Image (cartoon, helix red, strand yellow):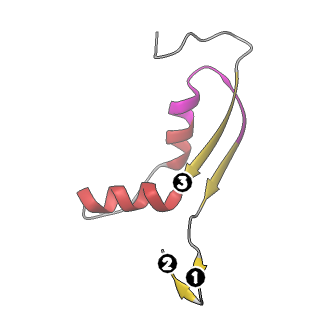
């Protein structure tokens, strides 16, 4: 049993913050190959996946990239 009790009707939506994931990986490894599909499957466990979204937090302030 994991952190939460799983019921057969549980549904999950996953939001991946790609910039933070890749930034964290690149700080500790020399390469940045990440298995996003495997990550989503691991998070979902045996629950029903409704949707998975990958979000990039890049934004501009006064025309300057603040990523």
Q: Are marks 1 and 3 in contact (CB under 8 Å)?
A: no
Mark 1 and mark 3: Cα distance apart in space = 20 Å
In the displayed structure image, the side of residue 1 where residue 56 appears, left or right: right
Question: Crowdedness of circle 1 by 10 Å Cα count: few (<14), some, many (20+)?
Answer: few
Rendered residue at 70%/18% (across/down): 10
**Horizontal side, residue 16 vs residue 48: left or right:** left
Please tell me whether mark 2 sits on a helix, a strand or a loop.
Answer: loop
Tell me residue 7's x, y (percent): 66, 9
Q: Which label is found at residue 17?
A: 3
Q: Nearer the viewer, residue 9 or 58?
A: 58
Residue 57: % across, % down: 56, 65
Tell me: residue 38, above or below residue 1. below
Mark 2 or 3, which is nearer the eye?
A: 2
**Which residue is rendered at x = 53% and y = 88% of the image?**
64
Q: Earlier in the sequence, mark 2 or mark 1?
A: 1
Q: How crowded is mark 2: few (under 14 residues within 10 Å), some or many (20 or more)?
A: few
What residue is at 24 percent from the left and 56 percent from the top? 28
Separation of disc 2 and disc 1 at Cα?
7 Å
Q: What label does residue 61 carry, if any?
A: 1
* Disc 2: which residue: 66
- Helix, strand or loop at disc 3? strand
Q: What stretch is highlighted in magenta?
A: 41-51
Q: Looking at the image, which is closer to me, 36 or 53?
A: 53
Q: Circle 1 — which element?
A: strand
Q: Tell me where residue 62 sits by quadrant.
A: bottom right
Query: Position of 37 compared to 7: left or right?
Result: left
Residue in the picture at 48% in, 74% down = 67
């Amino acid at each position: 049993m994991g952190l939460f009790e799983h019921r057969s009707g549980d549904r999950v939506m996953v939001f991946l913050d790609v910039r933070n994931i890749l930034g964290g990986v690149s700080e500790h490894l020399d390469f940045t190959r990440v298995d996003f599909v495997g990550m989503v499957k691991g998070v979902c466990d045996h629950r029903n996946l409704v949707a998975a979204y990958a979000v990039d937090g890049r934004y501009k302030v006064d025309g300057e990239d603040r990523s």
